[in-house]
Image: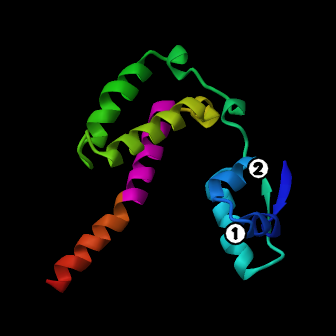
Amino acid sequence: MRTIKASEVKKLKLQGLSFAEIGKILGIHKGTAYRLYKKGLVDPNYSERIGNKPRRNQRTFCPIWQKDEKWAKVLYVCLPRFLSRFSPPNSDEFQSLYDYCLDFAYTSPQILRARNPIAYFWGCVRKRICGVFVSEIKRKEVERNVD
């Protein structure tokens, strides 16, 4: 973990380098270099700590299907069928929701600690879907009221 100052990015940008080149030099993503540059224009003393996110391979992996064989049906049959009610199965929105739910199921140790793990999982899925689709429902209601 290290701190990169926006002034470093600004100096390299003034030399005519692209954000991709700046990223390679500093060992960061080009989007991070761009963000540092933009925020550095507003605040010359701005800096960010880079590398402070936990690595994906450090997250615990919970083989939930080894605890209960019902999980295979829940994750690979029931879940896609349930999510297809809200979004077409070939859409990006469906795939992102499905990936989120699978990732949650595989990496959340809370599921195994729950008294009824399958009910806990479905409750979390419903909360996620409500959070995703509530804003869309409100937008559609506003559109209806305008017409």
**Most foreground residue, 64 or 106:** 106
**Most foreground residue, 115 or 59:** 59
* Direction from residue 60 to residue 3 in the image, left or right: right
- Of the residues tagged 1 and 2, which is closer to the observer? 2
Q: Which type of secondary structure does the marked residue at label 2 adopt?
A: helix
Residues shaded magenta: 117-132
x and y, in percent, of residue 59 in the image? 68, 33
x and y, in percent, of residue 53 in the image? 73, 47
Q: Residue at x 51, y 33 (%)?
A: 105
Q: Residue at x 31, y 30 (%)?
A: 78
x and y, in percent, of residue 33 in the image? 68, 59
Indicate which disc, 1 or 2, sits on the residue closer to the N terminus.
2
Asked if the magenta segment contains residue 130, the reply would be: yes
- The disc at residue 25 is 2
Asked if the magenta segment contains residue 86, the reply would be: no
Q: Is residue 77 above or below residue 114?
A: above
Total marks shown come to 2
**Most foreground residue, 47 or 96:** 47
Q: Gap between marks 1 and 2, in whole Å?
A: 14 Å
Q: Amino acid at mark 2?
A: Ile
x and y, in percent, of residue 24 in the image? 71, 47
- The disc at residue 37 is 1
Q: Amino acid at mark 1?
A: Tyr
